[in-house]
Amino acid sequence: MSAFSLFLYFSRKTSLPSQIFIATIFARIISSLFNYFTNKIFVFSEKEAKNSMIKYFLLALVQMFISGFLVEFISTEINHSIPISIKILVDFILFIISFQIQRLWVFRKQVSKGENHHEK
């Protein structure tokens, strides 16, 4: 949130269109780099997750566009309140969805050929 707030603050001093969306892009790039390695090593303990970086950044890209669009839309079309409060709510919901996608797809534990999932 602080990166978003910082980028939003500086973008408002320019004549750039869609300042909320631009702030979202820059904040997401910075946070995604940190989050990928933190999630890979500490949350999912996956040191060998195949193609996890590609999958993670694909997910982050989709999440970034959804977040930017929803925050921009809600703050300009529906509720003209502070964009940061809208971003907190939108990103919280996206976080829950993203965590499940990361668990099931991005950092999915690889099953070795010798393992049997039907053991009781």
Image (tube, rainbow, N blue to C red):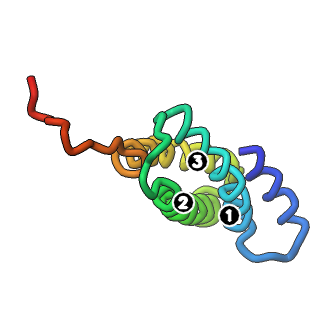
Residue at 60% across / 44% down in the picture?
Answer: 37
Q: On the image, numbered disc 1 is attached to which residue?
A: 25
Residue flagged by tag 1: what amino acid is it? Answer: Ile
Left or right of 32? Residue 44 is: left
Name the residue nearer the viewer: 19 or 108. 108
Residue flagged by tag 3: what amino acid is it? Answer: Tyr
Residue 115 horizontal/vertical position (percent)? 19, 36
Q: Earlier in the sequence, mark 1 or mark 3?
A: 1
Q: Residue 43 carries which label?
A: none
Q: What element carries label 2?
A: helix
Mark 3 burial class by Cα count in 10 Å: few <14, some 14-19, many 20+:
some
Q: Are marks 2 and 3 in contact (CB under 8 Å)?
A: yes
Residue flagged by tag 2: what amino acid is it? Answer: Phe
Q: On the image, numbered disc 3 is attached to which residue?
A: 36
Q: Are marks 2 and 1 in contact (CB under 8 Å)?
A: no
Nearer mark to the viewer, of 1 and 3: 3
Left or right of 3? Residue 102 is: left
Query: Which quadrant would the C terminus be assigned to in this image?
Result: top left
Residue at 46% across / 45% down in the picture?
Answer: 48
Disc 2 from disc 3: Cα separation: 8 Å
Depicted 24 relative to depicted 94: above or below: below
Q: What element carries label 1?
A: helix
Name the residue nearer the viewer: 70 or 110. 110
Disc 2 from disc 1: Cα separation: 13 Å
Q: Residue 57 carries which label?
A: 2
Residue 88 horizontal/vertical position (percent)? 61, 44
Left or right of 11? Residue 108 is: left
